Amino acid sequence: MSMGALLVPTFRSSPNLLSLPLEQYITHLITHTHLPFSIIPCTLILVHNVRRSFLDNPTRSKHFLCVFDPHKLWAGLFINAARALCPSNPNVKNLEYWSEVAGIPMKEIEGVVREYLMLTVRDVVSECLRLSGWLGG
């Protein structure tokens, strides 16, 4: 399925995006990207899994600096979901694009993406090992 190019945003990113109510921020992420609708349930699953993982093991939060910022959580998981769903689209790797869309400064966006990639990969690997019988639980 061809995605076409993600368009460079035509809006001026507001420094207030991160102060929007979370529902409006999520709507902003969805409406200002040109990604398949399937990214929404994928992101919801990632959010649920990360939340469950932290409820099960609260000491993990010491290793992840921005995990309690719900806007950065959604942005990081949204970006990683986009990269998983559209790996052949070079624009999903464009951090300048995501910085503009998410309203997160360039100096922070890479760290946000990396932290949530580490979280989701660890959770996916743990879940696969548990389901395959390698881990108890």
Image (cartoon, helix red, strand yellow):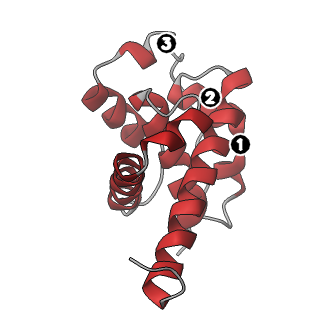
Q: How far apart are labels 1 and 3 at the CA level?
A: 19 Å
Q: Which amino acid does label 2 sit on?
A: Ser
Residue 3 in view: no
Q: Is the C-beta separation of discs 1 and 3 under 8 Å?
A: no
Residue 115 occupies quadrant: top right
2 to 7, vertically: above or below: below
Ranked by sequence position, the earlier of labels 1 and 3 is 3
85 to 72, vertically: above or below: below
Residue 99 got which mark? 2
Residue extending farthest top: 15
Q: How far apart are labels 2 and 1 at the CA level?
A: 9 Å
* Mark 3 Cα shell of 10 Å, populated few (<14), some (14-19), many (≥20): few
* Mark 1 Cα shell of 10 Å, populated few (<14), some (14-19), many (≥20): few
Residue extending farthest bottom: 132
Relative depth, front residue between 105 and 50: 50
Relative depth, front residue between 8 and 113: 113
Residue shown at 56% from the left, 33% from the top:
62
* Mark 2 Cα shell of 10 Å, populated few (<14), some (14-19), many (≥20): some
The kind of secondary structure element at disc 2 is helix
User: Where residue 16 sits: x, y (%)?
Assistant: 44, 10
User: Where residue 117 sits: x, y (%)?
Assistant: 61, 52
User: Where residue 45 sits: x, y (%)?
Assistant: 35, 60
Residue shown at 53% from the left, 80% from the top:
129
Q: Which amino acid does label 1 sit on?
A: Asn
Residue 14 got which mark? 3
Which quadrant of the rendered structure holds the C terminus?
bottom left
Residue 94 got which mark? 1
Ranked by sequence position, the earlier of labels 2 and 1 is 1
The kind of secondary structure element at disc 3 is loop
